[in-house]
Image: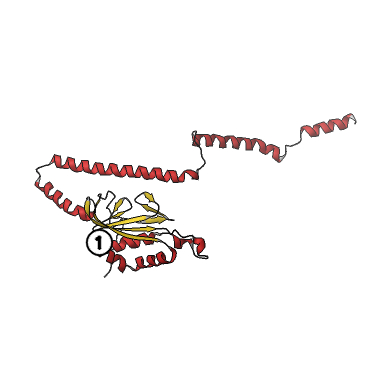
Amino acid sequence: MRLADRSRATFVWLTRRPTRWSAAVPVVAVLAGMLFAVSAQTAKGTSLRSDTADLPALVRQQTRIHQSRDQQVGDLRNELSRLAQQQAPGDAKLDAATKKGDQLAAEAGTQRVTGPVLTVTLDDSALSPSSFPGTPLDYFVVHQQDVQAVVNALWAGGAEAMMLMDQRVISTSAVRCVGNTLILQGRVYSPPFTIQAMGDPQKLRNALGDSPQVDIYKQYVEAYGLGYEVSERHRETFPAFTGSTKLDHAAAVGP
C-alpha cells in the first residue's frame, strides 16, 4: 500500500460516525440503572410480586381483624352507656330517653334477645355434576338469591330477630355471595349456610311454604340434590346487632 493511500484509510477510520446500536447502549444502561433504583426504593426490602397462593390466608386474617374490631365496638358502646348513666344518674329526661331506647332496642336489633328459633340450612349438592351431562354447574351450588329468598320469607313470616351464620342481622343487612361463598358485614363464609329466625315456629314454616322463591329452590333440591333442612329449638339467645343501622339510600314503596 502506498503511503498516501494508507493515510487516507486511517483518516476514514478515525472519523467514522458511530452506529445506531452503539449509541443506544449508554442510554439503555442509564434507563436500567434508574429502573433498579426506583424498584429498590418502592420495595424497601419486600417483594413486589403478588402471591395469590396466600389469598385464602389473607381473607381469614382480615376476617379475624373484623371480628376483633366488632368486639371493640361493642365494648366501647357498653362503656359509653355506663359513663352516661354515671354522669347524670338522677336526670329525669335521661332516664326517660334511656327507657324509650331500651324499648326500641329489641325492634332495632341492638339488644340481646331470647326465644324459640327456626333454623334453615342450605348446602351445595353432594351429587357429581358429571352424572348430569350438559347441566350447568350453577345448578349444584347455593346462590345469593337462594339465601335471600329464605331470609325474606322468614321476615315476612313475622321473625322478631335473625341470625345468619354466626352474626346477628337486621332487615337492612345486605346478603352478598361471590361464587359459592357468602360475604356478610366484612366476613366470608362457605356453605352450608344457616339462617336462624326467632319467632312463632309454625308461622315461620308457613311463610317458607308460601314463598315462590323458596319453592323454586326446593325444586332444585329435588332435581339436583341441593341441601335444605328445617329444624326447631325451643330456646335460643341471639347477641345484639353491632353493625351500622344507618341507611345510605331508601325509597318509598308505592301502593
Q: Is residue 8 left or right of residue 38?
A: right
| Front-most of residues 216 and 63 | 216
| Front-most of residues 31 and 80 | 80
Q: Amino acid at mark 1?
A: Pro
| Front-most of residues 52 and 18 | 52
Residue lying farthest top? Answer: 3
> Where residue 174 appears, x then y in whole percent?
33, 56
Residue 252 visible to an observer of this rendering: no
Mark 1 lies on residue: 201
> Where residue 85 appears, x then y in whole percent?
15, 42
Q: Quadrant of the C terminus?
A: bottom left
Determine which quarter of the picture holds residue 72.
top left
Residue at 38% x, 65% y: name it.
217
> Where residue 147 appears, x then y in whole percent?
36, 59
> Where residue 77 appears, x then y in whole percent?
23, 44
Residue at 44% x, 43% y: name it.
57
